[in-house]
Image (cartoon, rainbow, N blue to C red):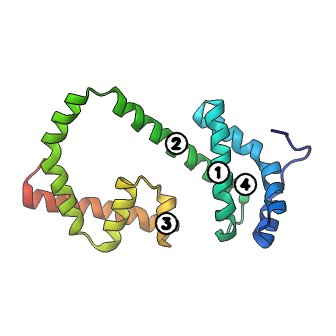
């Protein structure tokens, strides 16, 4: 990866947003990829994973930049990179956690928890549609607040509110219909 000779300019984002062509996107990559790589390496602490993250992030940026209304591109890019890395870490932990468990213990505990999973699913069905959708996207699909907000066209405060109210309403419903866990 070749480092640029000058400090990166946020003008490259504006140019790509206007033109949406390969040449202007290449300029973004040349100017900003080393910063994305550095942040990725800081979080992922693995050279190959950081290189993969740079590829994944820039692949996502090709589609995301034209849709964004951003005033501070550097901060936005840092946030996108950070969230991508945190999702990678979350996925990695889940993968290793599953590998480290005794398969019979997991089967036994999952059979014990099955009635509660059914209660959780039933409680989710009783939520307001916006709460239910945010709960499903966050807990079942693993999306971040930011990703849910973008997907639903709402702000992150509203996402957090739907999640908090949805969890509270689910807990109340479960306690009323199944008792306390």
Residue at numbered disc 4:
74
Query: Cα distance, mark 4 to mark 1?
Result: 14 Å
Residue 119 place in picture, x, y as percent: 15, 56
Q: Are marks 2 and 4 in contact (CB under 8 Å)?
A: no
- Residue in the image at 70% along x and 40% along y: 37
Asked if disc 4 and disc 1 are in contact, CB closer than 8 Å, the reply is no
Q: Secondary structure at mark 4?
A: helix
Q: Secondary structure at mark 2?
A: helix
- The reply to whether dot 1 and dot 2 touch (C-beta < 8 Å) is no
Residue underneath mark 3: 149
The residue mark sitting in front, 3 or 2, is: 2
Residue under the image location 64 percent in, 51 percent down: 57
- Location of residue 17 by image quarter: bottom right
Q: Position of residue 166 (x, y in %)?
A: 29, 63
Question: First in sequence: mark 3 or mark 2?
Answer: 2
Q: Nearer the viewer, residue 105 or 148?
A: 105
Could you tell which of marks 4 and 3 lies nearer the N-terminus?
A: 4
| Quadrant into which the N terminus falls | top right
Q: Give whichever of discs 1 and 3 has the lower sequence position.
A: 1
Q: Cα distance, mark 1 to mark 2?
A: 12 Å
Kindly report the distance in space between the C-alpha atoms of the residues bearing marks 4 and 3.
Answer: 20 Å
Label 3 element class: helix
Judging by the rendered image, the residue that carries numbered circle 1 is: 57
């Amino acid at each position: 990866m070749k480092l640029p000779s000058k400090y990166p300019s946020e003008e490259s984002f504006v140019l790509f947003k206007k033109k949406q062509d390969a040449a202007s996107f290449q300029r973004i990559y040349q100017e900003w990829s080393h910063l994305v790589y550095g942040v990725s390496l800081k979080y992922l602490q693995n050279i190959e994973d950081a290189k993969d993250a740079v590829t994944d992030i820039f692949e996502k940026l090709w589609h995301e930049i034209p849709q964004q209304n951003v005033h501070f591109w550097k901060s936005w890019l840092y946030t996108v990179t950070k969230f991508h890395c945190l999702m990678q870490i979350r996925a990695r932990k889940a993968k290793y956690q599953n590998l480290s468990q005794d398969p019979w213990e997991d089967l036994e505990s999952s059979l014990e928890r099955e009635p509660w999973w059914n209660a959780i699913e039933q409680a989710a069905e009783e939520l307001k549609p916006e709460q239910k959708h945010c709960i499903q996207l966050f807990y079942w699909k693993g999306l971040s607040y930011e990703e849910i907000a973008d997907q639903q066209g709402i702000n992150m405060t509203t996402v957090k509110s739907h999640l908090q109210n949805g969890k509270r309403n689910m807990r109340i419903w479960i306690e009323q219909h199944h008792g306390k866990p």
